[in-house]
Image (spheres, rainbow, N blue to C red):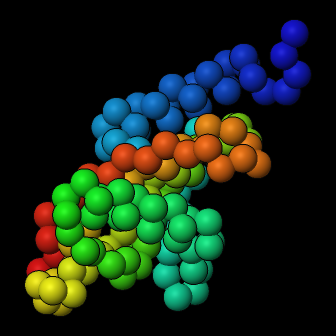
């Protein structure tokens, strides 16, 4: 028997609405927080946690290793964190710059999944968006 709101009609309705937004926008671009995901915008008033910055650097480092580039992290724009479990998945949107090329920012999105809570067993994927002008 489940304790709490799980399995109720309201919970099921909210969960369905959450996944409808994921299908429409994708997890990286989901607008606001839902029952399954928490969106956090990073700015001067609300800087990103150190763990999110480390995960962003890890994703960028993976891209640099695979592509032979030397992008450097400029900043994290936002991240979306999965809810409901201790080991989370982070969907991070970040800006980076290649100092050899110049000052145009490149946007990256990286997904870092914690495989176990309290143990840094991680999986990481990264993709590149169009450059910001």
Q: Is residue 64 above or below residue 85?
A: below
| Residue 57 in picture, x, y percent from top left | 44, 68
Whether residue 33 can be seen here: no
Question: Would residue 43 appear left or right of 50 to someone viewing this image?
Answer: left
Q: Is residue 15 above or below residue 109?
A: above
Q: In this view of the protein, which residue sits in the foreground, 15 or 54?
A: 54
Question: Would residue 33 appear left or right of 23 to someone viewing this image?
Answer: right
| Residue 32 in picture, x, y percent from top left | 49, 55
Whether residue 104 can be seen here: yes
Question: Would residue 133 appear left or right of 23 to someone viewing this image?
Answer: left
Residue beneath the point at 51% across and 26% down = 16
Question: Would residue 61 appear left or right of 102 to someone viewing this image?
Answer: right
Q: Count the labels in the image.
A: 0
Q: In this view of the protein, which residue sits in the foreground, 45 or 52?
A: 52
User: Can you say which quadrant of the picture contains the N terminus?
Assistant: top right
Q: Is residue 70 above or below residue 90?
A: below
Residue beneath the point at 49% across and 81% down = 43
Residue beneath the point at 34% across and 42% down = 26
| Residue 86 in picture, x, y percent from top left | 73, 42
| Residue 68 in picture, x, y percent from top left | 19, 64
User: Can you say which quadrant of the picture contains the C terminus?
Assistant: bottom left
Residue beneath the point at 50% across and 74% down = 42
Tell me which corner region of the image, top left, top right, bottom left or bottom right, holds residue 103: bottom left
Tell me which corner region of the image, top left, top right, bottom left or bottom right, holds residue 47: bottom right
Tell me which corner region of the image, top left, top right, bottom left or bottom right, holds residue 132: bottom left
């Amino acid at each position: 028997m489940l304790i709490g709101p799980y399995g109720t009609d309201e919970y099921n309705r909210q969960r369905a609405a959450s996944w409808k937004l994921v299908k429409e926008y994708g997890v990286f671009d989901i607008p606001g927080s839902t029952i399954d995901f928490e969106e956090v915008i990073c700015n001067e008033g609300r800087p990103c946690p150190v763990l999110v910055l480390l995960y962003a650097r890890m994703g960028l480092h993976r891209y640099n290793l695979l592509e032979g580039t030397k992008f450097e992290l400029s900043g994290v724009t936002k991240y979306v964190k999965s809810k409901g479990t201790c080991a989370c998945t982070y969907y991070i949107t970040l800006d980076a710059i290649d100092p050899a090329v110049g000052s145009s920012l490149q946007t990256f999105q990286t997904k870092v999944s914690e495989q176990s809570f309290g143990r840094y067993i991680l999986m990481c994927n990264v993709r590149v968006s169009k450059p910001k002008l």
